[in-house]
Amino acid sequence: MVKNIAVIRGDGIGPEIVNQAIRVLDKIAELYGHTFNYTDVDMGGCAIDKYGDPLPESELKKCTDSDSVLLGAVGGDKWNDVPGHMRPEKGLLRLRAGMGVYSNNRPAKIWPQLADASPLKKSIVDQGIDFIIVRELIGGIYFGEHKTEDIDGKPTATDILTYNTEEIERIGRIGFETARKRGKRLCSVEKSNVLDSSRLWKKVMHKLASEYPDVELSDMLVDNCAMQIVKNPAQFDVVVTENMFGDILSDEASMITGSIGMIPSSSLGATTCGLYEPIHGSAPDIAGKDVANPIGTILSAAMMLRFSFDMADEADAIENAVSAYLDKGYRTADIMSEGMTQVGCSKCGDIILECLIKE
Ligand code: NAD
């Protein structure tokens, strides 16, 4: 198969981790007889420096013209003081909206080899952590009107949170469909005791439930969900929630599995052209030191093969190679523990390549 992949290395550790993922994709192409063509795309701080714009239209078009997009991360202190509409993260929001990817799926799964890296008590971890957060990605408060104005002599800021039934229904369906393929339990998370948008959210979810009688729907307030994720994560199968709640809860969920550096994500809309990226940011504190964990990005590439290219065997091969790497006792600094062998970002890539075999 021939696939065209837009590659956004971005800022900070982005280039280091994406390079390792590309090495893995190249080995997959060699083993399975595929051709992956890569198109470099500038987005984030590097695009601000080059074009004065975090995602010029020409760069966005390279993404929408591709079969899928692999992204490292964007942002960094250097661009903290640029005006809001010019920030590196605006490039990311524009990319998601431009690609129409309204559903972000983040697995929160503990690798057995890393059980000790979880900050939770062993008795909680032993009950198992294996759930998915389905987050609405292109609506809600991040895409509402933002303004700061003087009211009664005081600088006053406003951010508007809007959802319509169509936006809720399409993400709700992804939640139900995802649950249907897993443990058939869907937890809808909102703040319906306070917010109108959440009351509408809940109403739409319950209406949809009648179409999915095989899936058990439950409701949970977002503040309770934040507590339950650390108290009893085994209760969750699939969580579906709106943009900002999903942003926060998925970071919390990633931490209980050990390291933010291990977690991939996929973002999909109505087509198979998806956006694949690790859930962490550009980690400026460790950028350029060859110490970052590239596994979240490598596993994002595996998700791309599975969900956009229909290459399940190839995706399994990558996941098994990561597991074999962990079995051999290699760890990057973020997940290092006693008795293991510490490696850097590129060495981690070398060993995963050695472990990568055709299934
Ligand atoms: P971050 O995720 O970049 O880093 C948080 C902590 O986790 C840091 O200590 C970092 O060293 C560590 N870390 C992150 N990824 C790691 C990896 N692969 N291996 C080892 N350690 C890793 O979050 P932050 O520090 O809040 O944000 C830094 C910059 O990234 C900011 O400019 C922020 O806006 C941006 N950001 C971008 C994205 C994105 O591109 N999708 C997401 C979140 C934050």
Image (tube, helix red, strand yellow):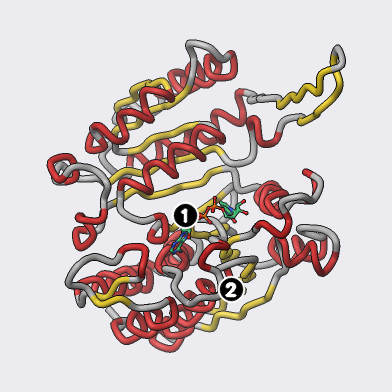
Q: Is mark 2 within 8 Å of ligand 1?
A: no
Residue under the image location 54 percent in, 51 percent down = 267
Q: Is 71 on the left-hand or right-hand side of 109? A: right
At 29% across and 26% down in the image, what residue appears?
216
Q: Helix, strand or loop at disc 2?
A: helix
Residue 174, x across and y down, in percent: 47, 39
Q: Is residue 228 left or right of residue 46?
A: left
Q: Amino acid at mark 1?
A: Ser
Pick the front one: 341 or 63: 341
Q: Which residue is mark 2?
A: 15
Kind of residue at disc 2: Pro
Quadrant assignment for the C terminus: bottom left
- 2 or 1: tag closer to the N-terminus: 2
Residue 353 versus residue 333: which sits nearer the camera?
Answer: 333
Image: 141 above or below 177: above
Alpha-carbon span between mark 2 and mark 1: 18 Å
Question: Residue 16: percent from the left, percent from the top?
Answer: 53, 75
- 205 or 47: which is nearer to us? 47
Residue 114 x, y percent position in the rendering: 23, 59
Question: Which residue position holds label 1?
Answer: 265
Residue occupying image coordinates x 30% and y 50%: 257
